[in-house]
Structure formats: C-alpha cells, structure tokens
Image (cartoon, rainbow, N blue to C red):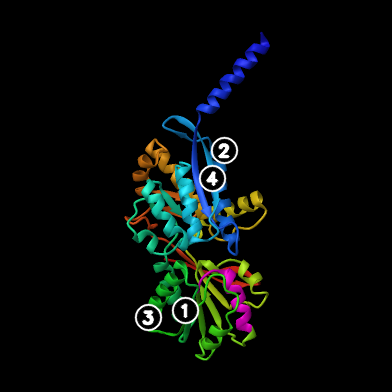
Amino acid sequence: MKKQAVVVAALAAAGLASAQEVVRIGHSAAVTGPVAYFGKDTENGARMAIEALNARGVTIAGKKVRFELVAEDDGGDPKQATNVAQKLVDGRVNGVVGHETSGTTIPASKIYHQAGVPQISPSSTSPKYTQQGFNTAFRVVANDVQLGQALGRHAVKDMGARRVAVIDDRTAYGQGLVMEFAKGLRQQGVNVVAREFTHDKASDFSAILTKIRAQKPDLVFFGGMSAVAGPMLRQMKQLGMNVKMMGGDGICSDEIHKLSGGAMADGQVFCAEAGGVDASGKPAMDKFRADYKKRFGINVQINAPYAYDAVMTMADAMVKAGSSAPAKYLPVLAKIETRGVTGPIAFDARGDIRDGTITLYTFKGGRRTVLAVTK
C-alpha cells in the first residue's frame, strides 16, 4: 500500500512538473572566434538572470513558471546571425537577448520583427538598429550618437586633440561609430586629417599606419573591436607612432592589453562604454561583479550586467502583462519603467534606452580605469 502511495505521489509530481510553463529566452552572440570573450560575457550575464529568476520562483498570471536559456553562437557573422535568429523563432522562444554586435543585431532584428518576437540587445550601439521602425527592437545601452559625440568632446576638450586620424573596420558598428565621432569632432571645431579603413579580421596594418603617420596625428580613433585594435597598437609602436588611441566599447576590455602583446602604454588608450553607473548605483554593480566572478571564475568584460538586466526587464514585462506570449507582453515592455543593476530602464518610442549613460575609461597596468560617467 505504501509503495502504491509513493507511485501515485511521484506521478502527481511529474504531472505538476509537466504542467509548469517553461519560458524560453533566446540569447545569441559570438561565443567562438576573435571576439568570443565578449559573447561569452553576455551569455554568462543572461544565464545569471535565468538562474536568479528560477531561484526566486516567478509566477505569471498566478502560475509558477520556469525560465530556460536557449543559447546560440552567431560567430559574429551577419549571415550566421540570421540563421540563428530563424532557428530561435522556429524554436518558439518567448523573447531574445542579443545579438552582440551591430553587424549581427541589425539583420537578425528583421527576422524577430516578422515573427513578432521581442528583442533586447545588451551591447549593440548602431543607431540603425532602432531606426528601422521595428516595434520589437530594444536596447539597454546608449547608442553611437551618444557614444561618438561624448568621445569627440573628450578628445578635444580634455585631451587637447587637434590632428585626428580615424580608422574603421568596415562593420556596421565600426563605420557608424567613426561617423558619429567625426561629427563630435566637428562640433568642437576639429576635422579629421586622415581617414582609413581595414576589416574586422585583419592583422597587418602597416600600409594604412604608414599613411597616417605622415599626417602627424596626435590621436588615432579606431572604430572596431579589441581583437584588431590590440595588434594595431603593437604595429603602431613598431612604426614609432607614440600617439594615443581612442575607441568605443568594442576596445573597452582588459583583453586589449594582452592582444597588444604588452605594447600598450599606461594612459595611451581611451575608450567609452555605452552605459555605466554613478555613485548611487555602484554598490549594486559591485555586487553583480563579485557574484559573476564567484559563478564563472572570471571577471566581467563589459556587457554581462546589461544582458542580465535585459533578461530581467523582459521577465518583468511578462509578469506585469500576465503573459509570456510575445504579442501580450510586448506593449508592456515598450512602456516599462524598472531599475536594474545598470540603473533605470525605460525605452523611448524607437526602443532606445532613455537617458543612457556613457563611461569614459583609460588603462593603467593593463586594467580599465574610470575617468568619468556622463550623458
């Protein structure tokens, strides 16, 4: 009799488990290739949020749900990103956090829009992403208009730059950032003295650097990622170009010091993170960074806290809407007002974060050092 009761209880528990709704959150970024450390960073941040939600025990419309992360690798390649996006849509995910780069986020966003699946990017900064008019597209970081203009102001007003050379990596991110930075320079009365380009998998920059050196710049601005910027710094040193380098969040990782082979001098490189917290938000961010290191054994690169907040914001919208169905919670997500590890989160009519912050950094001893948090 006891044995029969145990079997009945087990069957009941199994029935309860099968009845529990599973909310599937897709995540896509490059977790292989030259910028895999950025992609793994956002995947880890999203995973921490999923684990926190399940530990908390979230209910939607009075029913307990379990969150599941569906992690995919887009390799940082636009074509692969669209294949991954279609795979996530076909797998009926309830929402997507990603992609990592603007070059992958923009083409993937069309697929999510066609399927009506909400997408929050934790790291893509190209203005084009939210200028497409897709009501499914959101981001929790500032865009390149804010980033580029803040860097332009800092280059002229605080660094005294007067002769600036620019290089982009021909990606949507790199070209967009250089364009906005150049606008920021012009607003300060400074023009670009040399404009060159490379590509995001290049390793030899001697030809373009030699041309730039002839213009005697006091600053080189690079629109691209640290996987390219690091070797570029090494070759700049070999050519005797002891000038400063500046870039966006793509180079704003401690990895750049390793990738330069030690050629990067203290105070030589300046960058900006599309986000950041003021003094009031520092305790929460410090705790997140400590929890992240305890969970994964490594330090946060840049965007893990933004991926964490993207998942949490999506879950909050589902709870407030009383549904995890994309069509039901999407209007709530568009009007959400919440607070995350990275600060207040609310979106404007395009899906850009309202009042996004910018954090300026330099590097000392191979580690990022905060210069200022601005808007």
Is 156 placed above or below 64 here?
Answer: below
For marks 2 and 4, give the one nearer the viewer: 4
Q: Tell me which numbered mark, 2 or 3, is placed earlier along the sequence.
A: 2
Q: Residue at x 42, y 38 (%)?
A: 324
| Label 3 close to label 1 by CB (< 8 Å) | no
- Residues under labels 2 and 3: Cα distance? 51 Å
* Residue type beneath disc 3: Arg
* Residue 140 found in image quarter: bottom left
The question of residue 46 being in magenta is answered with no
Q: Position of residue 3 (x, y in %)?
A: 67, 12
Check disc 1 and report the residue beneath it: 155
For marks 3 and 1, give the one nearer the viewer: 3
- Find the magenta span and give its range: 223-237
Check disc 2 and report the residue beneath it: 55
Tell me if 86 is positioned left or right of 209 in this view.
left
Q: Tell me which numbered mark, 2 or 4, is placed earlier along the sequence.
A: 2
- Residues under labels 3 and 1: Cα distance? 11 Å
